[in-house]
Image (spheres, coloured by chain):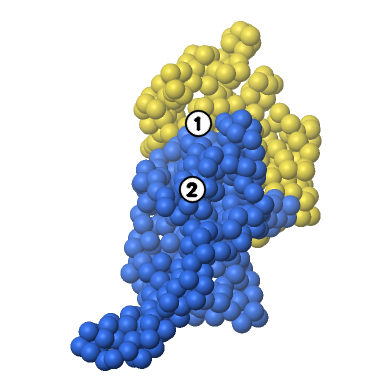
Chain colours: A blue, B yellow
Amino acid sequence: MKRVLLLLRKDVLVLRRSPLLLGILIAYPIALAVLVGLVASYGSSKPRVALVDEDNLPATVVLGGHRFDVERTIDAVSKNVTLVRLSPDEASRQLRDGRVVGVVTVPPGFVSTLRGMVHSPQLQLELSTGTISSRVEQQVQALVYSLNRQLQRAYIASNLRYVQLILRGGDGSFLGAPITVLGIQRAQRLLRGMPQTKRTAVLLDFLHDARLALANTNDALSSTAHPIELVRAPARGRTWALSAEVQAYALGLTITFLALLLAAGSLAAERDENVVGRLARGLVGLGQLVWSKVALAAAVALALGLAISLAFGLVIQVGGVTGGEPWRRLPLLVVGLVLAGGSVGALGAFLGAIAREARSASLIAVLVVMPIVFLGLIPAEIVPPAGWISALLPFSHAVDFFRSALYDLSPWREVALQGSWLLVLGAVFGGLARVGARRLLA
Amino acid sequence: MTRATPLLAARGAGRRFGHRDALEPVELEIWDGEAVALVGPNGAGKSTLLALLAGALEASVGSIERRKGARVGWAPQRPAQYGRLSARENLELFAKLEGEHDPQGAAARLLREFELPGEPEPSANLSVGNRQRLNLAIAQLGAPHVLLLDEPTAALDPPQRARLWRRVADLRAAGGSVVFATQNIEEVEQVADRVAALREGRLVYAGSIDDYDRTDVESLSA
């Protein structure tokens, strides 16, 4: 143990004497975390969808007595996509090139079918292949949903005018033809002025019931048009940058990058310095040498992880953001940082032992860290093999540990599970690194 | 420490790197007070034999035996030290690892004896000669009974060479031994009392310097 600590102290001293390297090692993963965040937010940005108008949509359309400004209506309903008007050929070409991810075609006769109110007119949707197409389909469905809602409001208003006409009577029009309607109220007055018989009583009862029923038509029509309505409450949660996900991923990514690179580079550097033989002849065993690098990775992960967490905590405190446990859970986070740093460090030491040279080890570590992180970012429910592979690497377990430690009301079960994963993976990779370290002597 | 057994012995010890035999099985014993020169052309297996004797490499076949309690100091051909640490920090670190009671004191003494710079300059910035002196100084830590030196004088100036061999003479006078690899015939004749000659990974001669024919050395090294 004393010898492991001596080597650890030496490595920390060496690291302190390389401020540029240390700065890059810290700044790079943080910059990477921000870039990943930006890419993730780009994932929810508006995809570009072509609108092919084969019906020569007019500037305005009157439906159910309601006048629609076509351009304004399209702008209002296409909040989640960027609609660009293109000719059919150009739309096909851009779909093939991937410049648009979908084509919505308004076929000939669309507006006249809509005006007829007998059949539902159809919009045609053509999508590119690939993982984004399902998301675009959802967004175009949302667009059609928004359009339908606007039309429903117009149709309901139109229907209600007829209901009012039936209720109160008067002049109106139907399918363009002028009509005069007696109306229930006037019919009731007429009936009451007539000699009262059993038949007039039955008619008056009916008119009374019909009047009551039609009085509720407004609400009934609205509720049958939208059996369930989604109402968005005012925004209350944290901003994206302060969310639990971002904090957990920022910690996970930074520590994974740093610990992997440090452990791989520093173990291989022992061979570059030609000291492995000197150490291995009874001063420091190869196992102790490997564990000193694991300890280095854990120590640096702890220091940097705590710094990031304190920065998050301060911002949350100053900003008066509620939710999460930025301070009380720090001891639990310390355990997670040490476990995550050590586990990733063991994987790094394994890479260092395989690579044997510090430059090769660093390059391999940089090449390996991205797939590890991205495998952890892919939702396992969407691509199960990515989840299986990620389960065998420390990154996703570290992220789950951090998220649970900082934000779960009762984190113990999750923390114990992910901590066990990190311990087991650390032991496995450490063991592999110990076996591989024999290569450092050759 | 019993003198019935050698301080250090290679018992059929050989080393293979992949499919290549760097050193075929060798029998060699190092006794108290001896100076053994390893000679032979480049790639003959001298450094591999020294690394095996030092315990820095594991033998692929055979074994290395060390008398109980015997301590070994090793200075490989390419200096083995941390380039970002100063000479003093290197000496202190290895002194602690060697179990020296007073690591700072041992480091200060060796800095003085090997005329190494005491300032906190990284050892990677030292001259080739100074780095080799630091390499040799580290080998002295832990009061070794046997010194294994791989071409120790290659980067030293004449006064430093003289000082090194005086130090070796002091060690031998105290009952210690030295095994050194060299290409320098004069050093063999002046320092060694036994010679082990290697060629293409095989031990081709092992005997006293008196029985050793100088012409053979040159032909082996050709």
Instruction: Give the side of residue A205 with respect to residue A52, left or right.
Output: left
Q: Secondary structure at mark 2?
A: helix
User: Residue at position x 61%, y 18% from top?
Assistant: B42
User: Residue at position x 35%, y 60% from top?
Assistant: A420
Amino acid type of the residue that numbered disc 1 sits on in the rendered structure: Ala
Between A428 and A41, the one lying in front of the other is: A41
Q: Secondary structure at mark 1?
A: loop
Q: Earlier in the sequence, mark 2 or mark 1?
A: 2
Amino acid type of the residue that numbered disc 2 sits on in the rendered structure: Thr
> Disc 2 or disc 1, which is closer to the eye?
2
User: Residue at position x 64%, y 75% from top?
Assistant: A315
> Few, some or many C-alpha atoms within 10 Å of disc 1 (few <14, some 14-19, many ≥20)?
some
Q: Is residue B199 above or below residue B190?
A: above
User: Residue at position x 58%, y 79% from top?
Assistant: A321
Between A385 and A196, the one lying in front of the other is: A196
Q: Indicate the position of residue A39 as horizontal and vertical percent values.
A: 60, 51
Count of numbered marks: 2
Residue holding disc 2: A113
Instruction: Give the side of residue B167 with respect to residue B22, left or right.
Output: right
Between A8 and A378, the one lying in front of the other is: A378
Q: Indicate the position of residue A112 as horizontal and vertical percent values.
A: 53, 48
Residue holding disc 1: A442
